[in-house]
Amino acid sequence: MKKVLTIAGSDCSGGAGIQADIKTITAHKMYAMSAITALTAQNTTGVYGVQETTPDFVAQQLDCIFTDIFPDAVKIGMVSNKDIIEVIAAKLIEYKAKNIVVDPVMVSTSGSKLLSDGAISTLIAKLIPLADIITPNLPEAESLCGFSINTSEEALAAAKKISLMLQGSVLIKGGHLSETADDLLYTAGKAEWFCSARIDNPNTHGTGCTLSSAIACNLAAEYEMSPAVKKAKDFITGALQAGLNFGKGSGPLNHCFNLQITE
């Protein structure tokens, strides 16, 4: 059984963060582990409180994981301050972590800010360079590249600029594009578009967490980057098409849409 570690914040409502990651990893029939960077009080309508984990305790969690059950892939989500980012980066280097997926979570689906301004520069300097792939949405990609993205051409220009920050791939999620909902994967100077129809489902809480975790699972399963992203997008499509409808706001996905329970 492959083993996948998620380093992220907890979502008490179960739709995003650690909870979405564990569900996604389990749905891929892999063993899920977690290092929690923050507790959040949130639901489908917004984020109402954040209690950060101390950097020392994040380090202790990572030591316990890497020295006992070494992960085949690592997904990193919400890291809310520069001290935690520095600790995570140091531990990934110390233990020679592999198949690192960084989802640069800056703003939640409901629009709540999750990353302090001072942490963004540390994210760029310390954590992003270690990634095999980063998965920003359009607002996050705009923060990283420094200009607005409204067209496919601008998305490509952004991917080229962001790619200078790391040796790995950049996946710019196009859900906010005015023309299409296509995603752009940029690897070693090569651009690949993943075209898919926009799914008519307002419940998108945790889509970014789920996609990045699914990519981590596929990399753990030793898929190359392009098919790893393609399979992850197929998983998201299925989870959205399942049409789960919980909560008063932007509801969660059905991560278990493809699980068959037999008696």
Image (cartoon, helix red, strand yellow):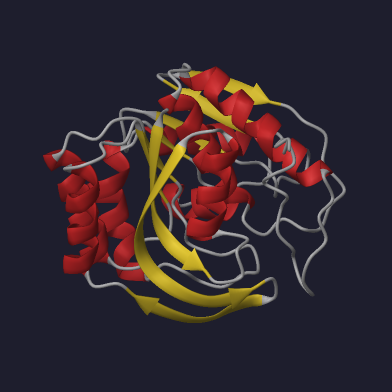
| Depicted 160 relative to depicted 213: above or below | above
Q: Is 133 situated left or right of 182 in this image?
A: left
Q: Position of residue 247 (x, y in %)?
A: 77, 71
Instruction: Provide residue 177's location: percent of width, then percent of height.
Output: 71, 45
> Seen in the image, is 105 located left or right of residue 128?
right
Which residue is at 73% across, 38% downward?
263
Please say if 83 is above or below 158.
Answer: below
Q: Nearer the viewer, residue 52 or 217?
A: 217
Name of the residue lying farthest toward the left: 94
- The furthest residue to the right: 200
Depicted 79 relative to depicted 146: above or below: below
Which residue corresponds to the image point at 82% horizontal and 40% vertical from the top-left?
198
Say which quarter of the image contains residue 92.
top left
Q: Is residue 227 above or below residue 197?
A: above
Observer able to see residue 86: no
Q: Residue furthest bottom?
A: 48
Q: Nearer the viewer, residue 180 or 77?
A: 77
Nearer to us in this view, 71 or 52: 71
Q: Residue at x 73, y 43 (%)?
A: 239
Q: Quadrant of residue 191?
A: top right
Count the numbered circles shown: 0
Relative side of 224 to 250, left or right: left
Compared across the picture, whether 126 is left or right of 181 comes to: left
Q: Position of residue 136 (x, y in %)?
A: 51, 46
Res. 58 visible in picture: yes
Task: Determine the image quadrant of residue 211.
Answer: top right
Q: Position of residue 113 (x, y in %)?
A: 51, 71
Q: The N terminus is located in which quarter? A: top left
